[in-house]
């Protein structure tokens, strides 16, 4: 089995992203970008005109990356409506996976590891 790391930009996810939860199966439409150092990044996208790949599999890890670059594991990424406070069935909070502690800062990016 192969793990694929997908970056989920918070501003992109706020629009129309579905919830992403550890242990769940996902089907993420993605684009690829190559950084100046040659590293290829896989980015989840809902608005790219040409989808380059679809990442399907089980979510094995989710990390929230803050503006300062610090990271923190999270249990799930709420759907975009919930993150905006518009979902009556989901309050959009983030929580730590093993303690249930509420995480106040949602950060700028979620890094989702998917096992194919």
Image: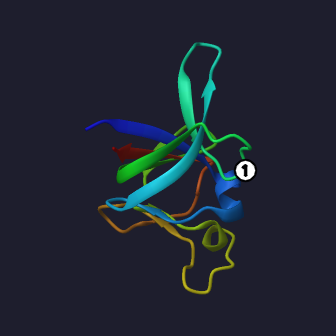
Query: Does 94 sit above or below residue 34?
Result: below
Which residue carries the number 1 mark? 47
Decide if residue 35 is on the left or right side of residue 54: right
SS of the residue under disc 1: loop
Q: Quadrant of residue 101?
A: bottom left
| Furthest-bottom residue in this view | 88
User: Which colour style is shown?
Assistant: rainbow
Query: Does 75 sit above or below residue 43?
Result: below
Q: Name the residue at 61% across, 86% down.
A: 88
Between residues 104 and 91, which one lies in front from this camera angle?
Answer: 91
Decide if residue 67 is on the left or right side of residue 19: right
Between residues 32 and 5, which one lies in front from this camera angle?
Answer: 32
Provide residue 96's location: percent of width, then percent of height: 39, 61
Q: Name the residue at 72% across, 50% down.
A: 47
Quadrant location, the C terminus: top left
Q: Name the residue at 54% across, 19% down.
A: 39
Decide if residue 46 is on the left or right side of residue 40: right
Query: Does 36 sit above or below residue 99?
Result: above
Query: Does 71 sit above or below residue 91?
Result: above
Provide residue 99's location: percent of width, then percent of height: 31, 65
Quadrant location, the N terminus: top left
Q: Name the residue at 74% across, 44% down.
A: 49
Q: Quadrant of residue 26?
A: bottom left
Decide if residue 112 is on the left or right side of residue 79: left
Q: Residues within 10 Å of mark 1 (few under 14, many from 20)?
A: few
Provide residue 95's location: percent of width, then percent of height: 44, 65
Q: How many marks?
A: 1
Q: Quadrant of residue 76?
A: bottom left
């Amino acid at each position: 089995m192969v793990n694929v790391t997908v970056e989920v930009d918070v501003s992109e996810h706020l629009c129309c992203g579905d919830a992403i939860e550890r242990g769940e199966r996902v089907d993420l439409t993605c684009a690829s970008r190559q950084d100046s150092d040659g590293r290829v990044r896989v980015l989840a996208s809902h608005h790219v005109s040409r989808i380059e790949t679809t990442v399907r599999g089980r979510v094995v890890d989710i990390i929230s990356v803050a503006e300062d670059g610090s990271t923190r594991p999270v249990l799930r990424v709420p759907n975009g409506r919930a993150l905006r406070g518009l979902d009556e069935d989901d309050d959009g909070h983030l929580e730590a996976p093993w303690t249930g502690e509420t995480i106040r800062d949602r950060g700028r990016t979620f890094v989702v590891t998917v096992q194919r």
